[in-house]
Image (cartoon, rainbow, N blue to C red):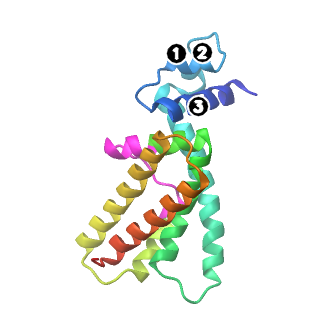
Amino acid sequence: MSTDQLLLTAAADLVAEHGVDDVTVGEITRAAGQRNGAAVHYHFGGRDGLLDAIVREHHELLDAARAERLRVLDASDDVGIRDYVEVIVEPMVAFLATNRGRAFLRIQADRFLDDRSGPMAASMSDIAGRLAQVMPAADAAMRTERTLLTTLLINVRLGRAAADGQPEPEQIATLSSTLVAAVAAVLTGKET
């Protein structure tokens, strides 16, 4: 395995277990079996660059999974908000099954809470456009608030689930269905 892959794996394992703020570059370097303390800086430009690489890797995976789900939906005549929410949420929930995925979810949640989320996965532009076509009529400010609220809800809830460690399959299923229902309810504006 290459040095950059060793560093990515070590960082993911440590972030998945301890969180973003509780992992140092030195710990990552040691866990990767590197003697050169500057390895993270050499390969990634620093700690943030290493975390960005984990995020980019998962954005690519999200884009591929979402593109496939959208192809399936494109063949259907009856597509609604809940269908698009499943396209957004379910591939992210699947990341709970691996250390690297849980690290990504924790990084995303941390960045959202600190208002430094950075770019979204490319697939989100397409999905946002499709959602806008099926969402109930609302003024632009209301749509924006609903979108921000649901984005925060998804990322923070999954980050919290990732912090709890690897869940059992039935916990993943419950989390996924509950999160999809909650996000769909916010986007539709339905009160219960």
The kind of secondary structure element at disc 2 is: helix
* In the image: residue 192, left or right of residue 31: left
Across and down, in percent, residue 31 comes to 61, 19
Q: Nearer the viewer, residue 82 or 53?
A: 82
As for residue 13 lying within the magenta part, the answer is no
Q: Residue furthest right?
A: 1
Image quarter of residue 183: bottom left
Q: Are marks 3 and 1 in contact (CB under 8 Å)?
A: no
Q: Specify the amino acid type for callout 1.
A: Gly
For marks 3 and 2, the one nearer the N-term is 3
Magenta stretch, residue numbers: 108-124
The kind of secondary structure element at disc 3 is: helix
Across and down, in percent, residue 23 comes to 47, 24
Spatial CA distance of label 3 from label 2 is: 12 Å
Q: Specify the amino acid type for callout 2.
A: Arg
The kind of secondary structure element at disc 1 is: helix
Q: Are marks 2 and 1 in contact (CB under 8 Å)?
A: yes
Across and down, in percent, residue 92 comes to 54, 55
Q: Residues within 10 Å of mark 1 (few under 14, many from 20)?
A: some
Q: Which mark is residue 30?
A: 2
Q: Residue at x 31, y 41 (%)?
A: 114
Q: Specify the amino acid type for callout 3.
A: Asp
Q: Are marks 3 and 2 in contact (CB under 8 Å)?
A: no
Q: Which mark is residue 126?
A: none
Query: What residue does disc 3 label?
Result: 13
Query: What residue does disc 1 label?
Result: 26
Across and down, in percent, residue 182 comes to 38, 67
